[in-house]
Amino acid sequence: MQTANLDLAHPAAPAGADFNAVKARQQGAWASGNYAVVGTTLQIVGERLCEALDLRAGETVLDVAAGNGNATLAAARRWCIVSSTDYVPTLLEQGRRRAEAEGLSVNFQTADAEALPFADNHFDVVLSTFGVMFTPDQEKAASELLRVCRRGGRIGLANWTPDSFIGQVFKTIGRHVLPPAGLRPPSLWGTTDRLNELFGSVAGVSASRETFVFRYRSPGHWVEVFRTWYGPVHKAFSALPTEKQAVLERDLLDLIESFNRAEDGTMVVPSDYLEVIIAKR
């Protein structure tokens, strides 16, 4: 997985943006905490995406920025030939253990989403759930997805929308901790306009607005889990002095309250995302 600020106040990346420095910072964020604690709760998104793609047994599938392997496992459960990639080796190891526990055959390989180590037109299907959208160089990442997907193949994405709960979480964090300068916001991948810019000249793009529901014991439980295990939130809290950590926590709790539909003390918060199917021509 890769992450950056979701604030829409930065419409374009300047030519001098240091993508390598940003990428190194991102790797450090995702290697901290333990993304799998959060990632496994998102499994249903990978299952839904594989169904939307109408995967067929025997198809070759690449999962990009796979994290701990939600879409990877969903494709492998459908008897596809799956390669799972991420630039954080510890996340791939977690995915490998999950696959082994289910007796699933998957090729796990460390790889940068902006420089995939595969030949042109290699895969029938390319996937990414809440992953490739966070790459610093959006054009390069989109180009790589298209390059490794065969003509007539499909690319399937799940991307948080700018106005979603998670989109607003990152926007809230961005008010407390300065994001990397000069990047297009990842949440643009959650808009059809940006997807058409990235893919529309060589592929057909269709998208539907879907919802994932975060279900936790309480709003405080969500904050505890994310600040302990979710790398970007963990790093944001650790970058602040104690008194400012308390302010960030309060802002996150206020945000949860504005989305929470539970009335029993628990947290039931919907977060919209785009489920995207791209047909390469």
Image: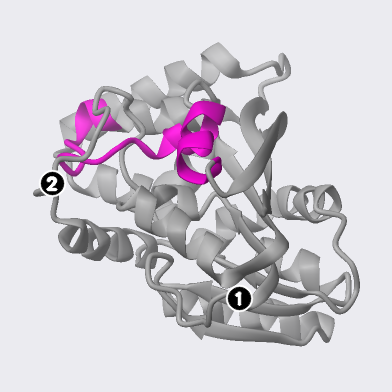
- The residue singled out by tag 1 in the image is 84
Task: Kindly identify the residue that appears in the image at 71 percent across and 14 percent down.
Answer: 263
Left or right, 143 with reference to 208? left
In the rendered image, the residue lying farthest to the left is 16
Eye-nearest disc, 1 or 2: 2
Residue 139, given in percent of the width and then of the height, sits at: 37, 50
Please tell me in which quadrant of the rendered image residue 73 appears. Answer: bottom right
Q: Residue at x 67, y 54 (%)?
A: 281
Front one among 64 and 281: 281
Measure the C-alpha gap from mark 1 to mark 2.
31 Å
Q: Earlier in the sequence, mark 1 or mark 2?
A: 2
What segment carries the magenta color? Answer: 174-200
Tag shown at residue 280: none
Residue 15's mark? 2
Query: What amino acid is found at the position of numbered circle 1 in the picture?
Result: Ser
Question: What residue is shown at x 29% (from left), y 28% (from top)?
Answer: 248
The spot of residue 269 in percent (x, y) is 64, 26
Could one spot residue 156 in this view of the protein?
A: yes
**What secondary structure is marked by label 2?**
loop
What's the amino acid at mark 2? Ala
